[in-house]
């Protein structure tokens, strides 16, 4: 059961994490994990990441949207795993939402670069670990 104090801890962990570990499933059914910079992490349910459309991870999510993301605080030994689905978005609205000055170094054609895309992760359930305790939860229940 997630009480208000734990919910506050979870939200703080998401807000303060600069890196999320993003896991996809490859063609052989093997999990693949990659560290990605967090962007626009404003709530528990929806998380966005920008990346290359040509990237291996992008192609994995197109074939199999099952995903998990993991946030951690090594100093306090806290971890949050969220499980859900990853969408690969190429629409201008989402690309503009995550665009930052300087991103041209990765995407020379700017927001309209065909190799620039956005991952939209939607969480369904999660597990929070802290203080030698695990808390499983459904996102809709928090």
Image (tube, rainbow, N blue to C red):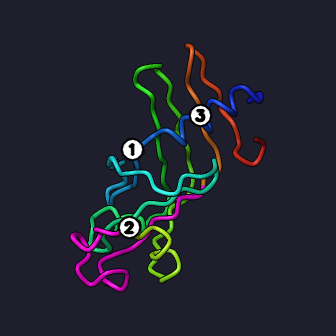
* Mark 1 to mark 3 CA distance (whole Å): 18 Å
**Is disc 2 placed on a helix, strand or loop?**
loop
The quadrant of the image that shows the N terminus is: top right
Question: Residue at image x 32%, y 74%?
Answer: 53
Query: Looking at the image, which is closer to me, 17 or 46?
Result: 17
Residue 59 in picture, x, y percent from top left: 34, 69
Query: Does residue 71 appear to the left or right of 45 in the view shown?
Result: left
Local crowd size for mark 3, using a 10 Å CA cut-off: few (<14), some (14–19), many (≥20)? some
Of pointers 2 and 3, the one earlier in the residue sequence: 2
Of pointers 1 and 3, the one earlier in the residue sequence: 1
Q: Quadrant of residue 55?
A: bottom left
Vertical comparison of 74 with 30: above or below: above
Query: Does residue 51 appear to the left or right of 38 in the view shown?
Result: left
Q: Which residue is mark 1?
A: 19
25 falls in the magenta region: no
Residue 136 in picture, x, y percent from top left: 65, 32
- Numbered mark located on residue 100 in the image: 2
Farthest top residue?
132
Which stretch did the figure color magenta? Answer: 100-122
Q: Which residue is mark 3?
A: 127
* Mark 2 to mark 3 CA distance (whole Å): 32 Å
Q: Are marks 1 and 3 in contact (CB under 8 Å)?
A: no
Question: Residue at image x 36%, y 86%?
Answer: 112
**Is disc 1 placed on a helix, strand or loop?**
strand
* Mark 2 to mark 1 CA distance (whole Å): 17 Å
Query: Looking at the image, which is closer to me, 25 or 82?
Result: 82
């Amino acid at each position: 059961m997630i009480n208000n104090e734990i919910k506050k801890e979870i939200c703080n962990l998401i807000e303060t994490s600069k890196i999320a570990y993003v896991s996809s499933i490859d063609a052989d059914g093997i999990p693949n994990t990659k560290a990605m910079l967090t962007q626009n992490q404003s709530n528990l349910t929806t998380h966005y990441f920008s990346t290359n459309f040509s990237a291996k991870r992008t192609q994995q999510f197109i074939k199999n949207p099952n995903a998990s993301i993991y946030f951690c605080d090594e100093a306090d030994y806290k971890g949050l795993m969220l499980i859900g689905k990853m969408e690969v978005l190429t629409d201008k609205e989402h690309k503009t939402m995550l665009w930052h000055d300087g991103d041209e170094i990765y995407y020379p054609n700017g927001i309209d670069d065909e190799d620039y895309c956005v991952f939209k992760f939607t969480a369904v359930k999660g597990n929070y670990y802290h203080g030698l305790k695990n808390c499983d939860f459904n996102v809709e229940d928090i």
